Image (cartoon, helix red, strand yellow):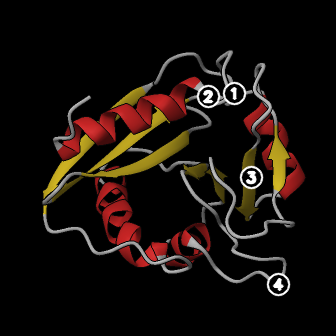
Amino acid sequence: MGFLISILDVAYAAESAGAACVLAESWNAPAPAAEFSKHVACMPAKYEPGRFYERELPLLRTLIALIDGLEFRPSVFVIDGYVWLGAKNKPGLGAHLFQSVGRAIPVVGVAKSPFGADTWSAQVLRGKSRRPLFVTSVGLDQGKAAELVSVMHGKHRIPTLLQRADHLARAAAGESE
């Protein structure tokens, strides 16, 4: 496989979580090159604004450990969330993920909802939606990251493969659809 994008997502049910990875060979790929998910029996930690990474990072690291066992290394991680939580670069989930992989693989954060009074992300409108996606990045220029998210496959606000990762994570968590 050549250039590989690793789209990571996590979902929670009452007493468990699911983590999913969708691998794509290009930003505009209509279908995954590979995908996998993992069920994690646990009592999810409570969500705390600005400390989301404490809840999600251990589950993302579980997925990355599975990827590490494969014959390739992703060129970029895409997560459902923020890399930075403010204009002064307060680290969010993506920045913590970047640190945890030795700053070796860029991370692009695609958030569906704004964090606070977001003035620092690149806002991307897709399809006919008037609601933007909030894109932040580390290891890759934020403007370039936003451009790449804008060309991802799908007619709707949420790109096809991000939706797929969300679906797989929810199914792995045991959440009803």
Q: Residue at x 39, y 72 (%)?
A: 47
Q: Which residue is mark 1?
A: 152
Q: Locate residue 107 relative to residue 14 in the image: left or right.
A: right
Q: Residue at x 55, y 23 (%)?
A: 160
Residues at marks 3 and 1, CA–CA distance in whole angstroms: 13 Å
SS at mark 3 in the image: strand
Q: Amino acid at mark 4?
A: Lys
Q: Nearer the viewer, residue 19 or 48?
A: 48
SS at mark 4 in the image: loop
Q: Amino acid at mark 1?
A: Met
- Image spot of residue 172 (x, y percent): 21, 41
Report the mark closest to the observer, 4 or 1.
4
- Image spot of residue 158 (x, y percent): 61, 31
Q: Is residue 115 above or below residue 77?
A: below
Residue 159 marker: 2
What crowding class fits label 2: few (fewer than 14 Cα within 10 Å), some (14-19), or many (20 or more)?
A: many
Q: Amino acid at mark 2?
A: Pro
Q: Amino acid at mark 3?
A: Val
Q: Locate residue 17 relative to residue 83 in the image: left or right.
A: left
Q: Which residue is mark 4?
A: 88
SS at mark 2 in the image: loop
Q: Answer whether labels 4 and 2 touch (C-beta < 8 Å).
A: no
Q: Which residue is mark 3?
A: 135
Q: Answer whether labels 1 and 2 touch (C-beta < 8 Å).
A: yes
Q: Residue at x 53, y 76 (%)?
A: 49
Choose the circle earlier in sequence order: 3 or 1.
Answer: 3
Residues at marks 3 and 4, CA–CA distance in whole angstroms: 16 Å
